[in-house]
Amino acid sequence: SQQGEEDPQALSIQEGENATMNCSYKTSINNLQWYRQNSGRGLVHLILIRSNEREKHSGRLRVTLDTSKKSSSLLITASRAADTASYFCATDHDMRFGAGTRLTVKP
Amino acid sequence: DTAVSQTPKYLVTQMGNDKSIKCEQNLGHDTMYWYKQDSKKFLKIMFSYNNKELIINETVPNRFSPKSPDKAHLNLHINSLELGDSAVYFCASSPGFVGSVLNTEAFFGQGTRLTVV
């Protein structure tokens, strides 16, 4: 079974709104990573959060990690049409991904 | 310079054929992976090698055989191709391997779209 499971499966918002997607995992980890995939392309690493961190920022991205609940969230603030993509999470435990969250940002 | 490169980008072949997909990374990473992404976009890990040693071998048909001649290359050979093998196959590499203290931030290739007809 996969380690990183993302939800929701799909998310559609208007430009300028915030987008939040979640990731759950099953085992203890050293870190959790979020990736982005544009249609027809490979995954691109966005941000890594370590197990001793609770929150991390990178530009318009904010990632939280709750190791007690084995969950993480990715928040994209002030979304743009160019943020339209699928977003995946994986942990260092086994680098397994799920089906991702497909984000559509309407102009 | 492409960090992780896969060839070919597209592959159309008939059922029963044998085909190979090649992957090379120029990042100096120790670990390489093969993933399969199906039509529903689920990304499934197939294999992982660390310094030419197999460390992850998921439940995949033994028609799939990875080969790592050196730590910069991980090729995927598929025998007796079936319709269900149609998917996009991604190669990736990372500095370290799962379960180690090294970083597992992965760099992905652009994918090989395999179509079996």
Image (spheres, coloured by chain):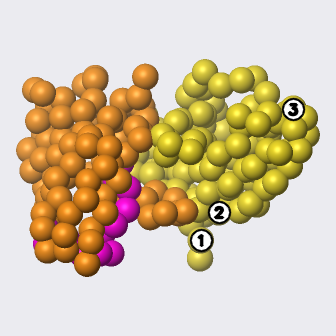
Chain colours: A orange, B yellow
Q: Residue A84: within the magenta?
A: yes
Residue range in magenta is A77-88
Q: In the rendered view, does B24 fall on the left or right side of B44?
A: right
Q: Residue placed at 73% from the left, 50% from the top? A: B114
Indicate the chain on which mark 2 is placed: B
- Give the mark toward the camera: 3 or 2: 3
Q: Quadrant of the C terminus of chain B?
A: top right
The residues tagged by marks 3 and 1 sit, at their Cα atoms, a distance apart of: 31 Å
Report if the CB atoms under discs 3 and 1 are less than 8 Å apart. Answer: no
User: Can residue A61 be seen from the camera position used here?
Assistant: no
Give the labeled residue for mark 2. Answer: B5
Locate residue A5: give its quadrant: top left
The residues tagged by marks 3 and 2 sit, at their Cα atoms, a distance apart of: 25 Å
Give the labeled residue for mark 3. Answer: B80
Indicate the chain on which mark 1 is placed: B
Q: Residue placed at 43% from the left, 35% from the top? A: A96
Placement of B66 over or under A12, stated as above or below: above
**Label 2, residues with CA under 10 Å away: few <14, some 14-19, many ≥20:** many
SS of the residue at dot 2? strand
User: Can residue A78 be seen from the camera position used here?
Assistant: yes
Q: Residue A50 in the image: x percent, y percent?
A: 20, 44
Total numbered badges shown on the rendered structure = 3
SS of the residue at dot 1? loop
Give the labeled residue for mark 1. Answer: B2
